[in-house]
Amino acid sequence: MHANRGDRLVVHGRTVGHHDRVVEIVEVMGTDGDPPYRVRGEDGHEAIVSPGPDCVVRHGKATDADPGR
């Protein structure tokens, strides 16, 4: 998995009733775009994540027409 600052990380819901979460990658902490990533959610909360197989990187910054979904 490779990402750049400004890309979106989509974390797919793993159980019924849990929706996908989309967060912005604000810092790539690994080498050459590799994890871990510092991410920021819509509520402003930041966390460091090492994405698993239930995650997908969407390259490029989201726009109002495409909020990352």
Image (cartoon, grey):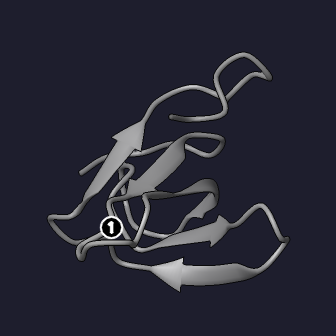
Q: How many marks?
A: 1
Pointer 1: residues within 10 angstroms few (<14), some, or many (20+)? Answer: few
Residue 41: percent from left, percent from top: 70, 66
For image coordinates 47% across by 30% down, the residue present is 59
Residue 39: percent from left, percent from top: 62, 67
User: In the image, 13: left or right of 26?
Assistant: left
Residue named by callout 1: 13
Residue 5: percent from left, percent from top: 62, 46
For image coordinates 33% across by 67% down, the residue present is 13
Q: Secondary structure at mark 1?
A: loop
For image coordinates 75% across by 22% down, the residue present is 63
Residue type at mark 1 is Gly
Q: Nearer the viewer, residue 31 or 57?
A: 57
Q: Nearer the viewer, residue 29 or 63?
A: 63
In the displayed structure, 63 sits above or below 4; it is above
Residue 50: percent from left, percent from top: 34, 77
User: In the image, 48: left or right of 46?
Assistant: left
Quarter residue 36 falls in: bottom left
Of all residues, the one furthest to the left in this rendering is 53
In the displayed structure, 61 sits above or below 19; it is above
In the displayed structure, 27 sits above or below 48; it is above
Quarter residue 57 falls in: top left
For image coordinates 78% across by 80% down, the residue present is 45
Of all residues, the one furthest to the top in this rendering is 65
